[in-house]
Image (tube, grey):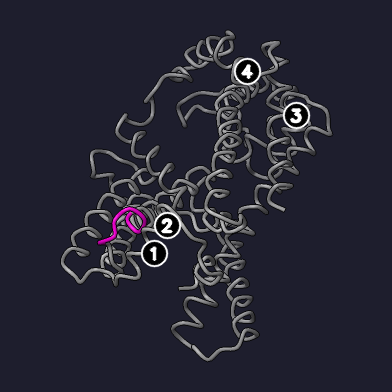
Amino acid sequence: TQVAQYCVLIIAYLIPAIAISLLLTNNPIPQLAFTFSDIAEKLNQVQVDLGFAEYTQPFANKSLLDVLFITIALMVGTAGLPHVIVRFYTVPDVRSARYSAGWALLFIAILYTTAPALSMFARYNLIDSLHNQTIEEVRQLDWASKWENTGLLTFEDKNNDGRFQLTPEKATNEIEIDRDIIVLATPEVAKLAPWVIALVAAGGLAAALSTASGLLLVISSSFAHDIYYRLINPEASETQRVFFGRVMVGFGLVIAGFFGINPPGFVGQVVAFAFGLAAASFFPAIILGIFDKRTNKEGAIAGMVTGLTFTAFYIIGVKFGGMSPWFFGVSAEGIGTLGMIINLVVTLVVSRLTPPPPPEIQEMVEELRIPETELPPGEAAGEF
């Protein structure tokens, strides 16, 4: 299922990028077109003419430190995402897990290196299609009318000149584009074939299903096995545990649906929050659990609670509480890196101040590093 969903996702993402790259640069490889064509220079000039900063100018909106912290949070946060970790249980042994991770990195690189090129193509096409166009010309664009009806694209002729202008100032800007529609709207803006537009929609659905299925699986197993069975009702039958897991999945769907309808931010920002929280909570415990035999449960719990609490407080305070980013201007999207460092320090200190793990746990850590024998089925599934 995961392979099929990824195939749909990558095809749906690459075909529009390749098609638009051909239209704008006559180069079918987006990464090369982005690097060696003059499209970047053209877009930068258009941006400057409209009063914006150059599109490729680094650190125009965020400082170097903030970008570095966001990058680290996204990198290490990936290792702590529960729905990513469980995917490695689908392979038979450690060697296969490492091998599959290598292939995954290759295909992820193909997807991620296409994103900057596609974003540049999309920005260029949007400006070319909408800026300084008359009201009548914009109304004739079928895609503009459809997205305007959703409220994700708005027009307002503030100076009453009969044209819509895109400017960096909110008071004079007459075109408001929700960032969440860029990928889905780009094929329509570029006037690609209807089947390409449908393919992009299918790719978006595949991405949503892939992520949601993994998260719901983690929610179900965590609550049913780790909380309900181990802490609340150790005598629970398998039927009771399955039922409890399904109930938790239902709650998860309701909560996810609420935040889907009322998002706390645009998609990229919310994803950064999730990765930051994962980095600040799970990543140190995973790394130290493998490479530091002295780390114990007291240290891991203390570190996770501290890192998660600090990061959640900072995100909520900056995003919703009006608090200014007080740590050298690092935004809420990047603060997970600092939370991860705090978690790491607390885990190491508390682990050294409390008794070491039992010898059998330390032996298991050695087997995790360089597996010499196959683990029993229960341990291989994490039931220890």
Q: Which mark is residue 240?
A: none
Instruction: Answer few, some or many: residues within 10 Å of disc 1's Cα (few below 14, many 20 plus, some between 14 and 19).
Output: some
Horizontal side of residue 100 vs 50, given as left or right? right
Q: Which of marks 2 and 3 precedes in the sequence?
A: 3
Secondary element type, mark 2: helix
Q: Which mark is residue 368?
A: 2
Horizontal side of residue 117 vs 150, given as left or right? left
Per the image, the residue denoted by label 3 is: 139
Per the image, the residue denoted by label 1 is: 364
The amino acid on which the numbered mark 4 sits, given as a three-letter code, is Asn
The amino acid on which the numbered mark 3 sits, given as a three-letter code, is Arg
Calculate the distance from the C-alpha at mark 4 to the C-alpha at mark 3: 13 Å
Q: Which of marks 4 and 1 precedes in the sequence?
A: 4
- Magenta span: 288-294
Are the residues flagged by discs 2 and 1 in contact, CB closer than 8 Å?
Answer: yes
- Residue 377 in sight here: yes
Image depth: mark 3 or mark 2 in front: 2
Calculate the distance from the C-alpha at mark 2 to the C-alpha at mark 1: 6 Å
Q: Which of marks 3 and 4 precedes in the sequence?
A: 4
Are the residues flagged by discs 3 and 1 in contact, CB closer than 8 Å?
Answer: no
Q: Which mark is residue 132?
A: 4
Are the residues flagged by discs 1 and 4 in contact, CB closer than 8 Å?
Answer: no
Image depth: mark 3 or mark 1 in front: 1
Residue furthest left as drawn: 353
Where the C terminus falls, by quadrant? bottom left
